[in-house]
Structure formats: structure tokens, C-alpha cells
Amino acid sequence: MDYFNYRRSELFAEDVAVQDIVYMHGSPCYIYSKRTLEKHWHAFDDAFGEHPHLICYAVKANSNIAIINVLARLGSGFDIVSLGELERVLTAGADPKKIVFSGVGKREDEILAALKIGIRCFNIEVSTELDRINLLAGQLGVIANVSFRVNPDVDAKTHPYISTGLKENKFGIDIKYALTEYRRAASMAHINVVGIDCHIGSQLTETQPFLDALDRVLSLAESLKAEGIHLHHLDLGGGLGIRYKDEQPTEPAEYIQALLARLAGSDYEILLEPGRAIVGNAGILVTQVEYLKPTESKNFAIVDAAMNDLIRPALYSAWQEIIPVNQHSDAVEQTWDIVGPVCETGDFLGKERRLKLAQGDLLAIRSSGAYGFSMSSNYNSRPRAAELMVDGDQLYLIREREILSQLWNGEHLLP
Ligand code: LLP
């Protein structure tokens, strides 16, 4: 459920007409709904009831500081994967004690910065990362809280590019060797073992793979307990899917009920790292039709947004719904490929869509809040789009459209 709806035949973001936003700020632009964002975060947080938990929003899904700040005000934690994301969440007002640091390749400077600010936990993904963190924590005279990201070898049944919990993936530590790693960690002077972590993939629509992963993680936690290594939390990662088309993903409440049922009796604090399920359907990308180009084999609608703005269709053949901003059109309904101006055949936003289109029309690409702007680039020297957030009848510019000179900012001519 989101707050992008038609009133008569015009698309609104909460109480603001999308067309008015484009008149003011131009096209293409990303528009987010604050109310939707908050609702989706609460769907996770509320479902835990009294059970100790922390929702750590996965910043990579959408890292605009206004989005982070809205969630920080709700009390959210954050899952980060780089120094850039650390600085972003701190700039946006996050509590360092609610930051977990994931990622397979943490550099020394990244670890040092996170240790200095005193984050909640490092999710270790490589055996030698443990030694590096212990050494750096020793140099600073602090103790690092750590958990291991274990790879439970569970098939998430999602797109292979976003499936991460199989043996052959680069992520995490094979659960078979986890006991050895925990023993090593428990004996280190500057390490405090606090939890276990796993993340098996993204856009999962069923609960079963999550429950299978939880079973394996729980059994490891119990084996550790038998050895005197007591964990405080289990971090089950992100990955809950959303509805793009006709998927029927498990609702957060149902997912969390299933987790709690499986956990019955144990009091581990549960951490989750949802990204897409919080922000995906809280954003749209609005674009304008520049040209209609009917050809012998296909009808192309060439729009002013492209794969540099939203790469999901090109990269994963992802399907995202494309709807008109104004429904009243005299045009005849036809089948269109919605394509961008970038010089690549893969530059499409949607294929074979039935739409009534005229040059100059505005289209909204739904479910663009997650992995939309955050994966955008300047390919073809295209300035990145503006980002706006609506709150009721208020509109806020949360990222200015890039200007041309930003494109070569920092580049230098030879003498
Ligand atoms: N935690 C970790 C360690 C992750 O690697 C990810 C996502 C998440 C949490 C959040 O997952 P989510 O709840 O958003 O599914 N660009 C792809 C998705 C890549 C996901 C990468 N990791 C896409 O556009 O579909």
C-alpha cells in the first residue's frame, strides 16, 4: 500500500499533484512519499511487539539523507556497507549505537572510522577481516562488537544476481567453519562477540527460505552457547520482496510472526536489515515523452529518463509498472516500448506496455524508491535527476538536479 493515487484522472503523491511537481522541478525526477516510508517502517517495527528488536534500514536501497533522517526520527537503525554510507547516516542524524556495518571488503580506513564513532556491530564476512578489526581496535584501545555473516547455503529462489546465501556466492563465511571463527574471535583481546548475521538474497516473496536460514543460525547459536559463547542478537538481514507486478510477497507482519513463532522461548534480540520493503514502493520516477517513434516492428516511446536514472530493467530485466500521470488522453491505446535516449539497446524502462500516449505526456514508473536513484549514474554525460519528497500537501526538494558543470567537476586537462 502506498500513497500514490489517482484523484479523478490525475496522479497525486499524497496531496500534491505529480504534474505540478514536474512544472516546478522539471523532468525526470524521483518523487517519494514520506507517509508511505513511515508506514512501511512501522509495518516492521510494530510487528515485533515486545520482543527485543532493531530495524536497521539498508542504506544502499536509497541513501538520500532526507530519507535516512525520516527513518532516524522514527528510531531506526541502519545497515551500512561503506565509509560513504557511514558518513551519510551520521550526517542525517543516525545514532551510532544503531549502526551495523556489513560488506565483504571493509578497508582499514572504513573500519577505523566505524570504531572511532563506536558503531553497534561489524558483520564480518572474511576470516582475515576479524584479525584486521582486532588489530585496529587494539591500536585505538577500544573493543569491537562483532558478529559473523554466515552463509547458510539456502536457496532464496530469486534472481541469481541478487541471491547471496548459496555456497557459491562471495558473501559470508561458510556456516561449517563458523564455530572455528567464533572460537578464534572469543579469544581475541579487542573483540566482543555479540551476534550472528545472515542475508540470503533480495526480493524474496516466500517466508520459507528465511525460516530455513533462521533454523541454521539458531542451531549455530545454541552450539556456541554450549561452548560458553553467548550471543546477544541474531541479524537476519534484509530481502523481503515487494509487489512490482503480480507477485504476492509475504507481508512484513506475517514474516515477523513466522520468525517469532520459530524463536519461541529464546530471547535473542532480532535485527533485520530491510531496504526495498521500506522504500521501494515509497517512490516513483517521473519522465516525459520526448518522441513517439512507430516503426514497422515496434512502437517506441522515447522518454527523457534512461538506464542511467533507473538501471533495474536493463540490468535484471526487472518489470516496473508504468502509468500515465494524466489519464485523460485522446490518443488510441497501443503497445509501446518505453525507451531512454542512451546509446544502448538495453536502455529501456518497460517493454510492450499498453498505453495511450502523445508527445509531451508524463509517465510515472512505480516502485522506483529502492535501487533507483542509488544505482543511478552519469552515463552518456546525463546529469542525475532531482529528488523530491512529499509530506501531506507539502513538497520538499531533497536533492537538486545536477547541473552540467558537475559532470566534469574534479577532472583536469593535461598541461
Ligand atoms: N543487508 C545486506 C547485507 C544486503 O546486501 C542487502 C541488499 C540488504 C540488507 C537489503 O536487501 P533488501 O531488503 O533491499 O532486499 N540492486 C538490486 C538489489 C540488490 C540487493 C543488495 N543487497 C535490485 O535492484 O533488485
Image (cartoon, grey):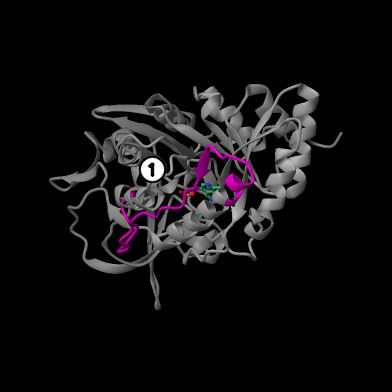
Q: Residues within 10 Å of mark 1 (few under 14, many from 20)?
A: many
- Residue at 51 percent across and 29 percent down: it is 98
Observer-nearest residue: 340 or 364?
A: 364
Residue 319 seen: no
Image location (x, y in percent) of residue 191: 70, 33
Residue 292, above or below 382 = below
Observer-nearest residue: 308 or 114?
A: 114
Residue furthest toward the left? 8
Left or right placement of residue 322 versus residue 135 in this view: left
- Residue at 32 percent across and 63 percent down: it is 247
Q: Is residue 379 magenta?
A: no
- Residue at 30 percent across and 47 percent down: it is 253
Q: Which part of the image, by quadrant, shows the C terminus?
A: top right
Image location (x, y in percent) of residue 222: 54, 50
Left or right placement of residue 43 versus residue 83 in this view: left
Q: Which residue is mark 1?
A: 278
Left or right placement of residue 47 versus residue 143 in this view: left
Residue 326, above or below 115 = below
Residue 89, above or below 319 = above
Label 1 beta carbon less than 8 Å to ligand 1: yes
- Residue at 58 percent across and 45 percent down: it is 225
Find residue 28 and report its image quarter: top left
Left or right placement of residue 83 versus residue 109 in this view: left
Residue furthest toward the bottom? 297
Observer-nearest residue: 344 or 37?
A: 37
| Residue stretch in magenta | 223-252
Residue 155 seen: yes
Residue 328, above or below 300 = above
Q: Is residue 229 magenta?
A: yes
Magenta stretch secondary structure, dominant: loop
Find residue 292 and report its image quarter: bottom left
Q: Amino acid under label 1?
A: Ile
